[in-house]
Image (cartoon, rainbow, N blue to C red):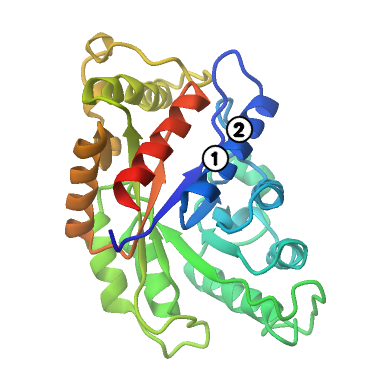
């Protein structure tokens, strides 16, 4: 297919495992993804979650860069209200200086956590105008002079690195910001599909190259989709109960690590039809391929970013291999 595939990794911690185990498994998967030809690997930012070890995106990116050679690496994303923009510029500029120009910076306005934790992390504003200004300053710090556009503060480590910036979002508001700023847009349809079609349309309609932040000359959409590919449809559906249980835990405020797969028939009523997980490609190779093709046709996405949760890392790696075989 002409549409490239990428990966979003939340570094899930399975029951009976530790954060150290989860990070090691993610690095093993990163090596595999690099060999299989995936376009990019992004790490998400989450806090106060017992089942995810994706909190420090820059550190995860650096470790993944050290065990890979080709694949682009980035944040999906840095939740900018949790960070001082200058620190983000310095961290990602350092990544480029350490690992070369295959680093992406995806930025979101959500905190990636509950409100109490967000208050503990808060470093900058999530308001649209402030968010846009912070992006403009980040581009200044990544530019040749290494100086913010709104203040005479210089960052030597990020100067001249020109780190590509993406805007992440799940609503028309985030889509409009991405379009107006002339930046690529990554839509979080893998867990927030309600405004998917409207968000993509809004982004394309709002897209402009007139703002000084513009870094591409046409709209570029990367859409998120849940994926589990196994040898058979039945086995893929069984493995997908891992993420269905995870989302059920969120609804019940039940704080558990990633649980083993179960017989889909044993899930509570409605758990297997969670609307938040409606964007998915789950099945044997041909079934999953057909679902991916329909999603590309629906969205016109320029790139897909896949999300695969598995209790056993070997199951995730098998899914990556089967998907690469049928798609790339």
- Residue 56 quadrant: top right
Residue 93 location (% of width, % of height): 73, 68
Dot 1 corresponds to which residue? 113
Residue closest to the eye, 54 or 7: 7
Residue closest to the eye, 45 or 104: 104
Asked whether residue 108 appears in the rendered view, the answer is yes
Q: Are marks 2 and 1 in contact (CB under 8 Å)?
A: yes
Residue found at the very far bottom of the displayed protein: 210
Q: How many marks?
A: 2
State the separation of the CA atoms marked 2 and 1.
7 Å
**First in residue order: circle 2 vs circle 1:** 2
Q: Is residue 256 above or below residue 25?
A: above
- What residue is at 47 percent from the left and 33 percent from the top? 317
Dot 2 corresponds to which residue? 48
Residue 25 location (% of width, % of height): 60, 31
- Residue 282 quadrant: top left
Asked whether residue 278 appears in the rendered view, the answer is no
SS at mark 2 in the image: loop
- What residue is at 59 percent from the left and 25 percent from the top? 50
């Amino acid at each position: 297919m002409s549409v490239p595939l990428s990966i979003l990794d939340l570094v899930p911690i399975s029951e009976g495992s530790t954060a150290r185990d989860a990070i090691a498994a993610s690095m093993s998967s990163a090596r595999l993804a690099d060999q299989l030809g995936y376009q990019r690997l992004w790490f998400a930012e989450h806090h106060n979650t017992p089942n995810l070890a994706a909190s420090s995106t820059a550190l995860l990116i650096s470790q993944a860069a050290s065990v890979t050679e080709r694949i682009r690496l980035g944040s999906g994303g840095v939740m900018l209200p949790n960070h001082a923009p200058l620190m983000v510029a310095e961290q990602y500029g350092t990544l480029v200086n350490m690992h070369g120009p295959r680093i992406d910076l995806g930025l979101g306005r959500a905190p990636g956590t509950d409100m109490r934790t967000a208050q503990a992390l808060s470093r900058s504003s999530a308001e649209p105008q402030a968010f846009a200004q912070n992006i403009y300053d980040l581009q200044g710090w990544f530019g040749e002079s290494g100086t913010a556009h709104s203040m005479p503060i210089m960052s030597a480590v990020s100067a001249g690195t020109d780190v590509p910036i993406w805007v992440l979002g799940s609503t028309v508001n985030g889509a409009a910001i991405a379009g107006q700023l002339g930046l690529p847009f990554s839509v979080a349809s893998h867990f927030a599909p309600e405004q998917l079609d409207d968000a993509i349309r809004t982004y394309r309609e709002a897209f402009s190259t007139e703002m000084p932040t513009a870094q591409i000359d046409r709209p570029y959409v990367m859409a998120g989709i849940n994926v589990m590919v196994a040898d058979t449809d039945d086995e893929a559906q069984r493995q997908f109960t891992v993420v269905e249980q995870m989302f059920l835990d969120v609804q019940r405020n039940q704080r558990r690590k990633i649980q083993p797969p179960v017989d889909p028939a044993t899930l509570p009523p409605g758990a297997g039809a969670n609307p938040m997980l409606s964007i998915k490609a789950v099945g044997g190779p041909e079934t999953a391929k057909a679902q991916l093709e329909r999603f590309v046709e629906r969205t016109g996405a320029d790139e897909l970013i896949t999300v695969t949760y598995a209790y056993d890392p070997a199951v995730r790696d098998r899914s990556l291999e089967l998907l690469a075989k049928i798609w790339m």
